[in-house]
Amino acid sequence: MKMRSFDVCQCGAPLQAIDRDIPQPRGTEVLLKMLAAGVCHSDLHIWDGYYEIGGGKKLMLADRGIKLPLTMGHENVGAVVAIGPDAKGVKVGDVRLVNPWMGCGECKVCLRGDENLCLKSSNLGVFSNGGYSTHLLIRSPRHLFDIGKLSPADAAPLACSGVTAFSAIKKIEPETLKGEALVIIGAGGVGLMGITLAKKMGAQKIIIVDIDAGKREAGLKAGASVAVDGSAADAVAQIQKATGGAAWSVIDFVGSSATVKLAVDSIIKGGTVIVVGLFGGDITVPTPYLPMRAMTLRGSYVGSQTDMAELLDLVQRTGMPAVPIRTRPLEDVNDTLNDLRAGKIVGRVVLTPAA
Ligand SMILES: [Zn+2]
Ligand SMILES: [Zn+2]
């Protein structure tokens, strides 16, 4: 029996179908038959092989240890089909979401609980082979999470866009989240997830900022109460008006030079900007702003094992975020990535290798 995966063999070139022998799990390894693989915007960066870091400079992923050929795909749900002799806590037939943000489990950062920030990361679909494939071998069952009654296609995006949004929102103090308007920049897949999760986490009023009218509309449908065109000349004034002065917290799911500047300009004294998106760029912040405005500018990257468990618990209790999810066969992976790059996808596309 062979497994088939779609691999990046050359940066930016179409993914190629490759057949390999199905591996036999050893030690604590677990083999999954893939049921759902979400297609994420960050796959475009991995595919291209770099991030823009402003001033025309690029952060090359090869320098960070990414090797080709690579099977991308980090939003994975599969059914357990084989387990290694030392894999505990799962059995054949179990359907599990994979936490792709895998660390070594031993470095100082992992030991603090932030395995997603491991110094020797082996993130699935980035540094090790992911789920654009019929089968997926997982190093250890501790990265597998029960999805309860959720469908595989609904649950898959929780592994990246879900936990990314959840972890960013968790960085806002609960009182501020409940008592003050929250500004979310970017109504793509992660931003829409952010709107619905923020509401489940107690946010009363959300202002969505996007330059695209269709995405602003999707943001309002997802539960935002005000939409602001981020490209409007008076965008800062509109945000300040909608927040009743200025924003206590802004989460930027885009992360471009323009959006981070907009976020910094829109916050109140003591306010916080959390940058999540990896669009790329750079900004200049007058250093006196940091003390005089007592501002916090911080980043948030995916989520920890704890975040994943808490997110699944929240979704089991309160229902799935109302983010539009469409499924496509695994073979459509190249078309899907191209559609995503062209901005033609609202919400999320999930590939279904077993369909
Ligand atoms: Zn992702
Ligand atoms: Zn580590």
Image (tube, rainbow, N blue to C red):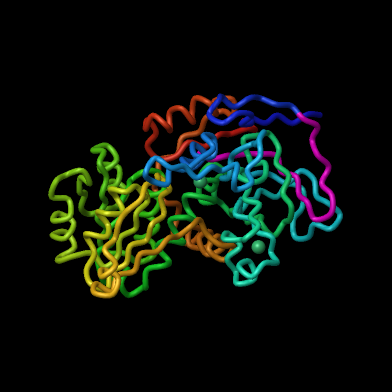
Q: Is residue 327 left or right of residue 120?
A: left
Q: Which residues are magenta?
A: 20-39
Q: Main secondary structure of the magenta part?
A: strand
* The magenta stretch spans residue 190: no
Quadrant hosting residue 342: top left
Q: Position of residue 131 (x, y in %)?
A: 63, 39
Q: Is residue 329 above or below residue 202?
A: above
Q: Position of residue 89 (x, y in %)?
A: 75, 60
Q: Nearer the viewer, residue 25 or 247?
A: 247
Q: Position of residue 58 (x, y in %)?
A: 46, 42
Q: Is residue 306 left or right of residue 138?
A: left
Q: Position of residue 185 (x, y in %)?
A: 30, 51
Quadrant housing the C terminus: top right
Q: Residue at x 49, y 25 (%)?
A: 335
Q: Residue at x 54, y 37 (%)?
A: 49
Q: Is residue 125 left or right of residue 94?
A: left
Quadrant housing the N terminus: top right
